[in-house]
Image (cartoon, rainbow, N blue to C red):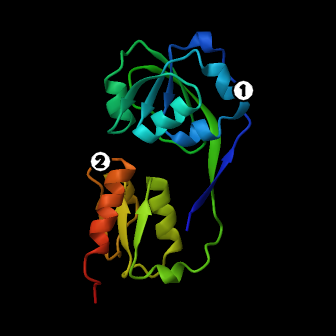
Amino acid sequence: MPLFVVEPLAWDVPEPAGFDALLLTSANAVRHGGEQLPGLRSLPVHAVGAATAAAAHAAGLVVAGVGEAGVEQLLATLPPSLRLLHICGENRMPNAGPQSITQVPVYRSAEVDRIADLDRLGGSVALVHSPRAGRRLAELMERRAAVAVAAISPAAATACGNGWAAVEASSQPTDAALLSLAARLCQQPDPK
């Protein structure tokens, strides 16, 4: 039951010569970058997460580095003098790094207005991939006491709010860690 539909945005490719590298924080930027993406192949890629790096590689981009603990951790490993082009989503967190970062939105995650059968989630585990998704799930779910939440990060867990059967953040911000947490939460007894 996705809470968002990912849609490409129209965008113009900045002149690659004005940048030292490409910053990718989501595989969606690669998936929805469109025909403009090949124009950036001259820039090495610094990606957050293995899935984003794999999408970049599949698109013919050269991956120079991969951070596994979020964008802040990745930026901390890069020279502060880098000029980074961050192709990203329309809804994004501001980057907190010393580098010069130019953000260019190439996709949006549009909220799904109505989700059918939300009430059937009772007794299940909802996977939350971002603080925005946590807030949206909390807006939509009135009866939450029988739903556990597995969140990809502490910020995503906090955004879900209170009243759930359980809310826990995965040990690492990866799909593998999130799925492991969800499997563990599935094994917990139903709260009565």
Left or right: 75 as drawn, with respect to 39: left
Question: At x 61% / y 40%, what residue is drawn?
Answer: 31
**Which mark is nearer the camera, 2 or 1?**
2
Question: At x 51% / y 69%, what residue is drawn?
Answer: 139
Q: Is residue 124 above or below residue 168?
A: below
Question: At x 32% / y 32%, what residue is drawn?
Answer: 73
Quarter holding the N terminus is bottom right
Q: Which of marks 2 and 1 is nearer the N terminus?
A: 1
Left or right: 68 as drawn, with respect to 42: left
Determine crowd level at label 2: few under 14, some 14-19, many 20+ residues with C-alpha closer than 10 A.
Answer: some
Name the spot of residue 169 as percent of width and height, x first. Answer: 30, 57
Image-quadrant location for residue 156: bottom left
Determine crowd level at label 1: few under 14, some 14-19, many 20+ residues with C-alpha closer than 10 A.
Answer: few
Distance from Cα at disc 2 to Cα at disc 1: 34 Å
Q: What element carries label 1?
A: loop
Q: Is mark 2 on a helix, strand or loop?
A: loop
> Which residue is the site of mark 2?
172
Q: What residue type is labelled 1?
A: Asp
Name the spot of residue 158 as percent of width and height, x first. Answer: 35, 59
Image-quadrant location for residue 97: top left
Quarter holding the C terminus is bottom left
| Frontmost residue, 135 versus 5 | 5
Left or right: 10 as drawn, with respect to 124: right
Name the spot of residue 68 as percent of width and height, x first. Answer: 34, 37
Question: At x 36% / y 15%, what residue is drawn?
Answer: 79
Q: In this view, does 55 lie above or below 43?
A: below
Which numbered dot is residue 110? none
Q: In this view, does 104 lie above or below 144?
A: above
- State the residue lying farthest toward the top: 17
Q: Which amino acid does label 2 sit on?
A: Gln
> Which residue is the site of mark 1?
12
